[in-house]
Each structure stands twice: as structure tokens, then as C-alpha cells.
Image: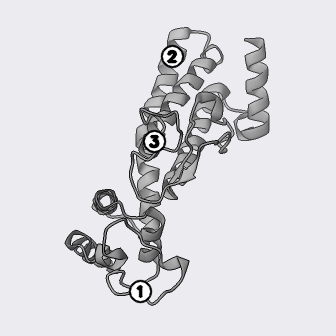
């Protein structure tokens, strides 16, 4: 326990100095690491990044991306996308990254239990309370990120449904993740022929007929009109 406390104190001093005067610094350390990990993985998801090897030893308590060997940015959007040749079950797939980081945080919490409280049951209860807040915090910040990507500067109750509808459409049509967002960000109607040339006009999907045919899909047309109405508000 002495070594653990020394390392935890060093971590607080180096990465979380605002916690030095906290009443329960090690419980607050768990919360702080969780929040940094939430923000990190949301940034991954936002740009289509798949870490590939999210073992506990490959996750930094500083909230930085480390030890990413078989990583990549996905092209065709699919929550099942994996890049590690040994990840046959898809444990570290793009869409599983939030659940994996929560699992890893639980292992981190187990390590901190002797420091959180001398009463083992109280330590477990307090750490469990923190970990149970993960899903709500993650979902709140992820939907805020999606609102930002859609150019929504305020919040409405239906925004989550709007962003999820787009992601479901991208999944069904294997649309290119980066290029779809890029086309939406140009300010021009993606359903109209693009005047751009060169690599920036890359096909956003694997459908035959090219990107223009994909954006003329009836489901996308309906979604786009819905999005434009939301932007107008």
C-alpha cells in the first residue's frame, strides 16, 4: 500500500494538482481519470479513430492516447470496425470503445480501493457510485460532440434522435465517415453535384453510382431536410 500511495500521490501532483487539497483525493482521482478518459474516447469516436488494443496497460491515467499499434481511422462507417489482426471477437471494435474504457476504469478503481477508504465496503460502494455515473457522463458529452459536428449551437430534445439517425444511415450504406461529415460541413447541399475536384471529392460510400447517388437516397434526403429545419432554429 505504501508504494501504491506514493504512486497515487505522484500522479495527483503531476497530473491533477487541483486535487491535492481534496477531502478524499483518491476518490476524486478516480473521478478525474474517468472524466479524462471519457473526453479522450469521445475525441476518438468523433474522428472515426479505432485504438485497436485497449488493454488496461495501454490506457493512460493522464488521459492521453498511448501504445496504439494496430490503430487506424475507419473509412466506411461501421461500429464493428476493428484493426487488430488478433481481435477476432471485436472486443476493441470502434463501437465497443466506450464499454472497454469503462471496464478498464473498474480495474483502476479496484487498485485504488485501499486508498479510497480504510473500510473496504465503503471504498467499494463509493467507487461503484463513481463508475455508475460513467454512462450518463459519456452519453451527455458524446451527444454534445455530435451536436457540435452538426453545427447546432443550442440544444433541443430531438437532437439525439437527429444525430443517431444520421449514424444509422451511414452504417446501413457503409458511407465514408470522414467524407460524409466533410460534405455536410461545406455549406452546400450534398445532394447536388459537387464542383470540387481532386482527393477532397472522394466517394463517401461504397455504393455503386458514387457519392451523388448515395446522397440522393430517400432516407438521406428526408434526414437532410430535417437537419436543415433544425439548423434554421
Distance from disc 2 to disc 1, alpha carbons, whole Å, reads: 57 Å
In the figure, is residue 92 to the left or right of 70?
left
Name which quarter of the figure residue 162 lies in.
Answer: bottom left
Residue 105 visible in the current orientation:
yes
Q: Secondary structure at mark 2?
A: helix
The quadrant of the rendering that contains the C terminus is bottom left
Dot 3 corresponds to which residue? 93
Q: Can residue 153 be seen at all in this image of the molecule?
A: no
- Foreground pick, 196 / 232: 196
Q: Residues within 10 Å of mark 3 (few under 14, many from 20)?
A: many
* Left or right of residue 225, residue 142 in this image: right
- Foreground tag (2 vs 1): 1
Q: Nearer the viewer, mark 3 or mark 2?
A: 3
**Tag 1 near tag 3, CB within 8 Å:** no
Q: Which residue is situated farthest in the bottom direction here?
A: 195
CA separation in Å, label 3 and label 2: 30 Å
> Of helix, strand and loop, which one carries label 1?
loop
Extreme residue toward the front, this view: 208
Q: Dot 1 corresponds to which residue?
A: 194
Q: Position of residue 13 (x, y in %)?
A: 79, 35
Mark earlier in primary sequence (3, 2): 3
Give the residue drawn at x 43%, y 31%: 132
Q: Nearer the viewer, residue 137 or 215?
A: 215
**Going 53% across and 46% down the picture, which residue do you hit?**
41
| Residue 157 located left or right of residue 205 | left
Local crowd at mark 1 within 10 Å, few (<14), some, or many (≥20)?
few
Vertical relation: 116 (above or below) 11: above
Numbered badge on residue 124 = 2
Amino acid at each position: 500500500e505504501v508504494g501504491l500511495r506514493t504512486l497515487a500521490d505522484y500522479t495527483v501532483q503531476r497530473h491533477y494538482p487541483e486535487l491535492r487539497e481534496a477531502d478524499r483525493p483518491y476518490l476524486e482521482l478516480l473521478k478525474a481519470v474517468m472524466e479524462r478518459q471519457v473526453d479522450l474516447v469521445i475525441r476518438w469516436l468523433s474522428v472515426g479513430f479505432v485504438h485497436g488494443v485497449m488493454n488496461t496497460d495501454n490506457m493512460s491515467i493522464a488521459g492521453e492516447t498511448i501504445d496504439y499499434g494496430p490503430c487506424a481511422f475507419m473509412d466506411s462507417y461501421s461500429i464493428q470496425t476493428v484493426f487488430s489482426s488478433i481481435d477476432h471477437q471485436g472486443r476493441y471494435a470502434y463501437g465497443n470503445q466506450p464499454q472497454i474504457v469503462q471496464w478498464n476504469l473498474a480495474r483502476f478503481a479496484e487498485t485504488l480501493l485501499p486508498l479510497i477508504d480504510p473500510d473496504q465496503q465503503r471504498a467499494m460502494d463509493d467507487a461503484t457510485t463513481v463508475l455508475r455515473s460513467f454512462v450518463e457522463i459519456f452519453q451527455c458529452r458524446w451527444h454534445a460532440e455530435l451536436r457540435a459536428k452538426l453545427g447546432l449551437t443550442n440544444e433541443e430534445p430531438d437532437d439525439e434522435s437527429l444525430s443517431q439517425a444520421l449514424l444509422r444511415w451511414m452504417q446501413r450504406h457503409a458511407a465514408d465517415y470522414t467524407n460524409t461529415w466533410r460534405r455536410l460541413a461545406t455549406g452546400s447541399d450534398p445532394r447536388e453535384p459537387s464542383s470540387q475536384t481532386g482527393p477532397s471529392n472522394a466517394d463517401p460510400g461504397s455504393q455503386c453510382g458514387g457519392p451523388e447517388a448515395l446522397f440522393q437516397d430517400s432516407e438521406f434526403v428526408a434526414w437532410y431536410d430535417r437537419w436543415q429545419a433544425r439548423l434554421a432554429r
